[in-house]
């Protein structure tokens, strides 16, 4: 059975039909890359999985339990599903350490000492333990995004959603963030990532989904999607990406 | 519109008007600013003359002697030097403008532009010094008018000194009202602001209630609210307040009235602050599993309060000053005490003394918050 299952997910913003029935099953330890043009619904889909956006049709199932719709404890769901945003969204009034331990202390009710120790451990693994007492504005974009990833990991989620996490970064800072994602993939983290980094998607993904206008048009192995897409629109999208020198 | 087929090299229209052509633009020619400099010099001369006349007028109204007169004269001369300095810079500007013209005539436009800019710098000094001299001298002129009547009616330090103990004791009451009210306002206003931001149709009635409250109490003069609440509650023997001693009753009713008025203002400040925090911050907090309340408590409110510290301080200073309004219901705080002294001595100087008490509190208060803001900025936004 899949860990995470989307069944016919529908999303409207007013009259704007953003997701038109998305079906997707994600197995444990699987890495899914969502690619597609801007506005195709990649980010919205991830936000729906995290219940940051309510859905208007279909359902989302996590480990056999429906986690969308009324009566669901979204705060509990979010402990299992972490998300990292394009714009980092670290809390500017809290230090790096406080950013990471806020969730564990307030939501998981961990003792402060234990949460701090674990955060310290995570930070030192990505080489940022010296920044523990700094405020986010003093960090580079790449460092901020790595802290944001650690903040999500500190909640020990079962699924991690990554929403174009390198799009706001200067080119030379992208690799330090991608390396962490690579490592997480190796260690078996279940992930869904929306990305414009095609080479990275090709390298790290178990499966690639091409979205357009709120529908998954094509899904398959990275090799198949990037070398032999069956859909004309996928091929057209990839042709434009190559033309822009991004693959 | 029909889409043309994407051929190998579609003929694209040029973006530049003349592709490939060299693009140059001549530097503007040197322009003399001698006329302006002369005008500034003449204005400086006139304003210095007026200033000196006003200072001499003030000097003649003063009836001091000995060392006091010496100090007074020293201050007058110092003020007079401002006008002289303005004239000096006016002449300097003329001198530099002439030098610039000469350089331009000797076909050295680059140096001429530098000299002209120097002349302009001198003219700005004329503006700064001349205006200051005129304004300060005018105040001295007012103080000297009618043989210094204004001075003796409002600024007589002997009367201020005679009343300083009574004023100090009364001012302590202002501080007490201010401190208690400020704490209540900060809590009450945040509550109102949060109620106004409650989502959904279910909360509409209480939201509307909060809107009516803020509209009403921001729309009514504070002095009327104080009048109605303090006198009205007192007359109606409202339970809770009725069992208090007379002094306590006035104190707590004044606190209530001021809290109602300032709560309305401050809740609007809070609301602006809460709304200014980008929704992505709340999204990040919620995505970690924090509840709506925890998100407010740990993420949104702390950031909002940092951002609205200056307007919150403005309202605190205003509240501190408005404690004097309670004198209209017969509360003997500093203004009330000053009025009693005024009637006793038939002189307004004690009221001016009361004003000084407020300044002693508000000015350091403002500086302290400037310091806090600067420190917070340095802490969260990296140096520089």
Image: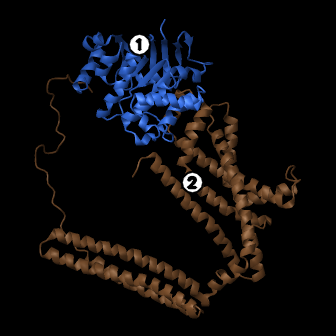
Chain colours: A blue, B brown
Q: Quick one: label 2, few (<14), some, or many (20+) residues within 10 Å? A: some
Q: Residue at x 68, y 43 (%)?
A: B210
Q: Quick check: can you spot residue A103?
A: no
Please tell me whether mark 1 or mark 2 is closer to you in this view. Answer: 1
Relative to residue A165, is residue B136 drawn left or right?
Answer: right
Q: Is residue B126 above or below residue B204?
A: below
Question: In what element is the residue under mark 2?
Answer: helix
Labelled disc at residue B311: 2
Q: Where is mark 1, residue-wise?
A: A30
Q: Which residue is drawn at 47% across and 8% down?
A: A2
Q: Where is residue B65 in the image (x, y as percent from the top left)?
A: 58, 94
In this picture, residue B215 sits left or right of residue A67? right
Q: Where is residue A174 in the image (x, y as percent from the top left)?
A: 32, 30
Residue A28 horizontal/vertical position (percent): 45, 11
Q: How far apart are marks 1 and 2 (CA)?
A: 51 Å
Whole-percent x and y of residue A171?
A: 29, 33
Residue A144 seen by the camera: yes
């Amino acid at each position: 059975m899949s860990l995470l299952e989307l069944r016919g997910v529908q999303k409207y913003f007013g009259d704007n039909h953003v997701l038109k029935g998305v079906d997707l099953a994600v197995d444990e330890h699987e890495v899914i890359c969502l690619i597609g043009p801007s506005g195709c619904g990649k980010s919205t889909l991830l936000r729906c999985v995290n219940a940051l956006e309510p859905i208007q049709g279909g359902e989302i199932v996590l480990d056999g339990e429906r986690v969308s719709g009324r009566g669901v404890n979204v705060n509990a769901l979010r402990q299992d599903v972490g998300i990292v945003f394009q714009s980092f969204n670290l809390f500017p009034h809290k230090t790096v350490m406080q950013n990471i331990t806020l969730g564990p202390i307030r939501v998981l009710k961990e003792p402060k000492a234990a949460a701090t120790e674990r955060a310290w451990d995570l930070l030192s693994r990505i080489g940022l333990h010296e920044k523990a007492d700094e405020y986010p504005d003093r960090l580079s974009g790449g460092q901020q995004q790595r802290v944001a990833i650690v903040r999500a990991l500190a909640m020990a989620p079962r699924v991690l959603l990554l929403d174009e996490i390198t799009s706001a970064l200067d080119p030379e800072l992208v690799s330090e963030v991608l390396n962490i994602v690579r490592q997480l993939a190796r260690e078996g983290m279940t992930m869904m990532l929306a990305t414009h980094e095609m080479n990275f998607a090709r390298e790290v993904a178990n499966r690639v989904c091409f979205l357009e206008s709120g529908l998954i048009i094509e899904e398959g192995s990275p090799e198949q999607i990037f070398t032999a897409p069956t859909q004309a629109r996928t091929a057209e999208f990839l042709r434009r990406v190559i033309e822009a020198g991004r693959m | 519109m029909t889409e043309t087929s994407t051929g190998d090299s579609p003929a694209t229209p040029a973006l530049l008007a003349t592709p490939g052509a060299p693009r140059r633009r001549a530097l503007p020619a040197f322009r003399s600013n001698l006329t302006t400099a002369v005008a500034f010099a003449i204005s400086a001369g006139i304003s210095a003359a007026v200033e000196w006349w006003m200072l001499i007028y003030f000097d003649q109204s003063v009836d001091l002697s000995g060392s006091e007169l010496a100090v007074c004269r020293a201050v007058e001369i110092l003020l007079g030097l401002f006008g002289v300095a303005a004239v000096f810079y006016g002449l300097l500007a003329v001198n530099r403008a002439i030098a610039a013209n000469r350089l331009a005539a000797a076909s050295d436009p680059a140096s001429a532009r530098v000299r002209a800019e120097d002349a302009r710098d001198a003219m700005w000094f004329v503006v700064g010094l001349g205006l200051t001299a005129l304004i300060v001298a005018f105040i001295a002129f007012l103080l000297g008018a009618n043989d210094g009547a204004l001075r003796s009616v409002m600024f007589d330090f002997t009367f201020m000194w005679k009343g300083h103990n009574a004023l100090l004791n009364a001012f302590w009451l202002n501080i007490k009202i201010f401190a208690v009210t400020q704490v209540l306002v900060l809590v009450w206003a945040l509550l109102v602001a949060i109620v106004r931001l409650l989502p959904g149709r279910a909360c509409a009635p209480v939201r509307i209630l909060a809107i009516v409250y803020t509209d009403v109490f921001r729309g009514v003069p504070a002095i009327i609210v104080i009048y109605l609440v303090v006198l009205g509650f007192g007359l109606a023997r409202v339970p809770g307040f009725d069992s208090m001693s007379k002094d306590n009753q006035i104190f707590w009713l004044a606190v209530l009235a001021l809290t109602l008025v300032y709560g309305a203002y401050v809740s609007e400040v809070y609301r602006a602050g809460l709304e200014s925090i980008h929704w992505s911050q709340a999204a990040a907090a919620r995505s970690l599993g924090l509840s709506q309340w925890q998100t407010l408590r740990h993420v949104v409110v702390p950031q909002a309060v940092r951002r609205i510290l200056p307007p919150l301080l403005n309202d605190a200073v205003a509240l501190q000053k408005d404690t004097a309004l309670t004198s209209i219901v017969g509360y003997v705080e500093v203004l009330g005490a000053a009025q009693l002294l005024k009637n006793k001595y038939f002189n307004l100087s004690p009221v001016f003394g009361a004003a000084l008490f407020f300044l002693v509190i508000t000015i350091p208060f403002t500086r302290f918050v400037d310091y806090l803001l600067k420190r917070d900025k340095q802490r969260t936004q990296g140096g520089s």
